[in-house]
Structure formats: structure tokens, C-alpha cells
Image: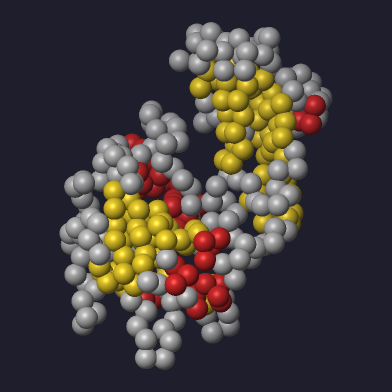
Amino acid sequence: MDTVNSVLSMTFDVTGSGLCLDETHVYANVDDPGSPPDKGAPGRFPFKHENLSTAECVQVDPYVIYEFDLECWQTAALAAHAVVCESMAEPDWQSFVALFEPELGQSTAVMMRMSRASSDGLLSAEILNSGELDGVHGAWYLDVDREMALRNVYMADPIPTYMLSASGEVEANPAAARLVEYPDNLDAVNWLINRDYSGKLSTCGGRYTAGDVQRAIWDLVEDDQSTADIGPWDQCRVDEILAEATSYGEGFTPGCDQSVAVILNPIQATGRSIARIGIAQVPFSDVLAPCELLLGQCETAWAQTLGGDLPFSRGNRWGSYFEYLCE
């Protein structure tokens, strides 16, 4: 949250939760920022967005409130409320997994090359000659055991981190698990890459970088670490990412509007790995028809700071607000 030139910005973000934002409501008194909400339904708050997830599952909803008369030594009383709903839409996992199954007598190997997408360590992976998987995707390194020449074209074995069981259930892919030291954390890696951390504010200070995310991925799956060529990173921010990924990522399965981590293992003709293994962040919407959105059970949620929340002073005290000090 920032207050610059009397502008307040606030973002609702439930990315990677499997939930959709249907309504959001913000209390911010532009004339008297220190005045907390009295009581009343969140629908009566001065700022609100409704019917958000009608055509697609909305997981990020930003607000920009102008003429917010707060000096940077003052404390503002704010309230943020949302109606969040379960997404009932399910991706077609059978069609997705079928993209990696070889036809009779034909190898699944694809051509790929990794490139630097930004100065803060963000990578991209271009997949070539693979049919539905062709295109440029967000990317990360999976291991630190080898080197990779960026922009070199490699033949690679594409391996989805999920597969279908004999009963049709989505489960971890053992072929992916064999390539990392801590395979039980591949679900947390999938959760992490769907959070879009890069550029967001960290409670440690500053904003998360792609280097922070890369280090967190290695912490999750590798027994060795590296700082080479990953861009700027900070241990405190990495620890924040790891704490969330291990708390919320266990058992995570990507949904329709999310991405699947597809391992790209550069190989020789004999099948031996010859370069650093990568991950391509492949959105379902890039390779399959979008799912029809259906909303399930909905709940209300109030935002709070790490210091806790404060109940409304009147009414049944079900609502809450928090305080923000502009620094």
C-alpha cells in the first residue's frame, strides 16, 4: 500500500488459493483518514467492486483512491472486505497429460531455449516444434548441478509435474520426482509460481524479485544452493516466500486459470541430461480451451495486518478494520 501525492493504492490478491473474488469493498475516509468505520454492511463502504467473477475467476483486484488527504506521519483507519468463492471449474487434465504421451514410434523430445527476460533474474523458455506446447513461457531453473547456455537451442524432454492415476485422479508425476532431491515439494513449487511474487511488496522491505523466487525454488527442491546469475535477491524475502509456500502449497493442484510447472530436461540422444534443468510455467489457457467458470460456496473475509485487526465500535462487531501508518 502506498500514499503518494494523496493517492491510496490497495490490492486484493488471492492468487494461488483456488478462490475467486466476487465482491470487494474498501472503507477509506478521504476527508478524515484517521476516522474508523462506525458500523454497517460492507456493501455501504464508499468504494466497492461487485460481480467480478462472472466470465473468469478474478484473483487480483486493485484499487486506486484519489484525494486521500493523509500526511506521512498520520495513521489511517482502513477496512478491506471481500466475498470469496470456490471455483468449481476443473481443467481437462486428461487432455493436458496427453500432450506429453508419445505417439507410436515418436519421441516426445522438444526443442527449447531459455533466455533472460529481465535484469532481476526473470527467465523465459521458448518451446519449439512441439505442437500445442509451442510458445514463450515464464521459466525458472530447477537444479544447480549443471550450467546452461542461455539462448542455445537444446533438445529437451518435457515432463509435467502432475499425471493421472489409473482411477483418473491428479497426482505427482514420479518421472518429475526423480529429477530433484526433495520431490515432495514440487506441489509447493507449483503453488509458488502461481503467486506471481515478482514486483509485489514484501514485509521485509522492498519488493520481491525473480531472484528471490529462484532461490526459494532451489530451497524447496535442491540440497545445494547457488547465487550465480540469478539477479538481486534477499534472504529475508526468500524466507517469507518459503514460509508461505510450505504452509499453503502442500497438496496444491493448479486450476483452470493457473499454470502447471513443466520440467524441461536438456538431453543427449542417449537420454542423459546435458545442461541445467528448467521449468516452463505453462498456463492451461495456452494449451486447452478455457474452463467454464462455476462458483461454489462463498465466504466473507476481512483483511488485517500482522498486528491484528480492530472490531467496529458499534453494532454486532462482526466487522473489523486495521490501521496503516504512512512512512
Position of residue 292 measured from the top left corner of the image (x, y, whole percent) = 69, 61
Position of residue 226 measured from the top left corner of the image (x, y, whole percent) = 21, 50
Q: Is residue 193 above or below residue 110?
A: above
Rendering colour mode: secondary structure
Choose between 294 and 191: the one closer to the eye: 294
Whether residue 310 is visible, yes or no, is: no
Picture residue at 54% right of the left edge, 56% below the top: 258
Picture residue at 32% right of the left edge, 42% below the top: 118
Choose between 225 and 260: the one closer to the eye: 260
> Which image quarter: residue 210?
top left
Q: How many marks?
A: 0
Position of residue 217 measured from the top left corner of the image (x, y, whole percent) = 34, 53
> Which image quarter: residue 26?
top right
Residue sitting at the far bottom: 104
Would you say 232 lies left or right of 195 here? left
For the C terminus, the image quarter is: top left
Picture residue at 75% right of the left edge, 38% below the top: 50
Position of residue 37 measured from the top left corner of the image (x, y, whole percent) = 72, 20
Q: Is residue 265 above or below residue 125?
A: below
Picture residue at 40% right of the left edge, 72% below the top: 130
Q: Is residue 188 above or below residue 72?
A: below
